[in-house]
Amino acid sequence: MKNFCYVNGEIKSTSEGVIGISDLALQRGYGVFDFARTHNGKLFHFEDHIERLHRSATALHLKLPISAREIREVANELIEASELTTPSVRLVLTGGSSLDSPMLARPNFIIIAEELPTYPREIYSKGAKIITVKFQRELPQVKSLNYLNAVRLEPLKREKNAFDILYHSHNGITECPRNNFFVFIGDTLVTPSEYILQGITRKLILQLAANHFSIEERMIRFEELQAVDEAFVTSTSKFVVPISKINDREIGSGTVGVRTKAIMQLFEEYSNGYIF
Ligand SMILES: Cc1ncc(COP(=O)(O)O)c(C=O)c1O
């Protein structure tokens, strides 16, 4: 199986793609990334991912070395050359080489074609469990390379037999380490709008749901979780995952709620009909 990546202008086999040990990404955790997928053989909302990467980079004073058009061309070239069933594309921009000082240097830009992860069918048909953890991501609007807490909490997630973690803080309920969070309170779809990463799937869900439900983008207080009727999380790799349990409390009837099913259906129809 041969897969390909791009490192600063050169296309290489993924196993041969390297950057230096003095990179600020390695030494100080400084850099940004984005992760896009294909759906039915086509890159899905790729421009949105490039735009978000650009916003993340700007927030960290980094500059993308090639244009959006070139990024798309490289991504398609890597996908075509690689032997992947459902390709996805990881775009990584690092702080650059700067061993002993926290000064920014010339960024390294990497594009990797990789297999889209798959998830158990049951989470979509029966719903998944999430557990709450008190934490607020630093610079939440930025998709930075810093997933320190997400990685640190993996053992806890496994121990509690949970599919994901839900962050909360003085800012209320925010998001999961790699997913946005939604609830239904009656027929109203509620999702946090601040102190989160503005997910691309989140944006699409809000657009699709607008014709069917009333929508509130607002802070969700931790205590409100007690009274929600349905919940789900969204991301590029997972699309819409219904939540049946938060900590030890079942949500609604403890299975996939009817409104969540409607959202899943809307998203499936939209993604299957997506034409770039
Ligand atoms: C912190 C965080 N929130 C939310 C999301 C979901 O965003 P998207 O739908 O763009 O994948 C992600 C995944 O990229 C994430 O890392």
Image (cartoon, rainbow, N blue to C red):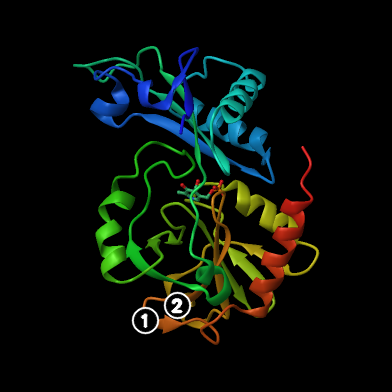
**What residue lies at 29% left-to-right and 20% top-to-bottom?**
23
Rendered residue at 29%/65% (across/down): 158
Asked if one can make out residue 42 in the rendered structure from this viewpoint, the answer is yes
Please say whether residue 111 is visible from this viewpoint. Answer: no
The residues bearing labels 2 and 1 have C-alpha atoms spaced at a distance of 7 Å
Q: Check the image and report above or below for 169 versus 251.
A: above
Position of residue 97 measured from the top left corner of the image (x, y, whole percent)? 30, 15
Q: Describe residue 131's horizontal placement relative to residue 258 as left or right.
A: left
Kind of residue indicated by mark 1: Asp
Q: Farthest left residue?
A: 100
Identify the residue under disc 2.
245
Q: Residue at x 59, y 36 (%)?
A: 49
In this view, the residue in front, 206 or 221, is 206
* For the residues bearing labels 2 and 1, Cβ distance under 8 angstroms: yes
In the picture of the structure, the residue carrying the numbered disc 1 is 248
- Please tell me whether residue 79 is drawn above or below residue 141 in the rendered image: above
The kind of residue on which mark 2 rests is Lys
Q: Quadrant of residue 74?
A: top right
Kind of element beneath mark 1: loop
Say few, some or many: other residues with alpha carbon within 10 Å of mark 1 (under 14 / 14 to 19 / 20 or more).
Answer: few
Q: Foreground: 91 or 188?
A: 91
The circle drawn on residue 211 is none
Name the residue at 34% across, 29% down: 30
- Judged left or right of residue 169, residue 74 is right
| Tally of numbered tags | 2
Q: Secondary structure at mark 2?
A: strand
| Residue 93 picture location, percent across and down | 44, 25
